Image (tube, rainbow, N blue to C red):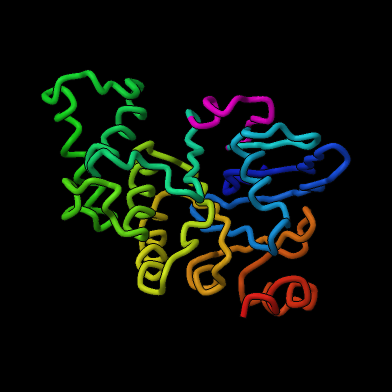
Amino acid sequence: MSEDVILETRGLTKEFKGFVAVQDVSLKIRRGSIHALIGPNGAGKTTCFNLLTKFLEPTAGQILYNGTDITSEQPAEIARRGIIRSFQISAVFPHLTVLENVRIGLQRAMGNSFHFWKSERVLGSLDAKAMQLLESVDLGTFAQSVTVELPYGRKRALEIATTLAMEPELMLLDEPTAGMGHEDVDRVKALIKKVSANRTILMVEHNMGVVSDICDTISVLQRGSVLAEGPYAEVSKNPGVIEAYMGTVH
């Protein structure tokens, strides 16, 4: 396996009682790249994510990470390897402050998860690192804000910060700009580009403007199979892709 491939799937397949949601999907995600999975609703993108993070067991096929077969590993083992997923619905604690949310992510990375009962003095030792992460996603001024009060786009930025706190080698972003207005989309797009330094990002995304601007490689899924793959300029001209997908998003 090539050195520059961080994640590979071989013939990945998932059936649900006779319905094939993902069929013979073989992907190679290059280290240090931003790689997008796109396709119409029901194409199998989220199922692929669930297979990669082992929220679902594949019916057939293999998943290799850094050359190691991880197909049989549990979600916690996958996360420990550095594959961290950010969910489509903001996965943050709404009634904690922005800083406290990131601190929890840092605790998990250190292996002392969710020690709410620890003294502020002990937890306070994580504050400098938490603030550094918040600054990196332009949330420094929101550190003491209660998360529930954040605008939607800022919540997604916080979710990325808490994901970064887990020190991912590979970040899986599930529709990071879903439901956002133009200003928030632009902010989160710039943020993804910024945090992609020194790590690999695999994302499911519907917004073609985001995909065309920041993604190195695009895999187009249709009915659970890979229809096309390559850079946006190439994929967007593929007649099969235009028929299946591109024509429906403009």
Above or below residue 12? Residue 242 is below
* Residue 23, x across and y down, in percent: 81, 48
Viewport quadrant of the C terminus: bottom right
Q: Does the magenta stretch include residue 134?
A: no
Q: Does the magenta stretch include residue 69?
A: yes
Above or below residue 23? Residue 233 is below
Closer to us: 132 or 139: 139
Quadrant of residue 126 within the rendered picture? top left
* Residue in the picture at 34% in, 23% down: 113
Quadrant of residue 123 within the rendered picture? top left
Please count the marks in the image.
0
177 left or right, relative to 155: right
Q: Give the range drawn in magenta.
A: 66-79
* Residue in the picture at 36% in, 29% down: 109
Above or below residue 148? Residue 69 is above
1 left or right, relative to 13: left
* Residue in the picture at 88% in, 40% down: 18
* Residue 241, x across and y down, in percent: 74, 72
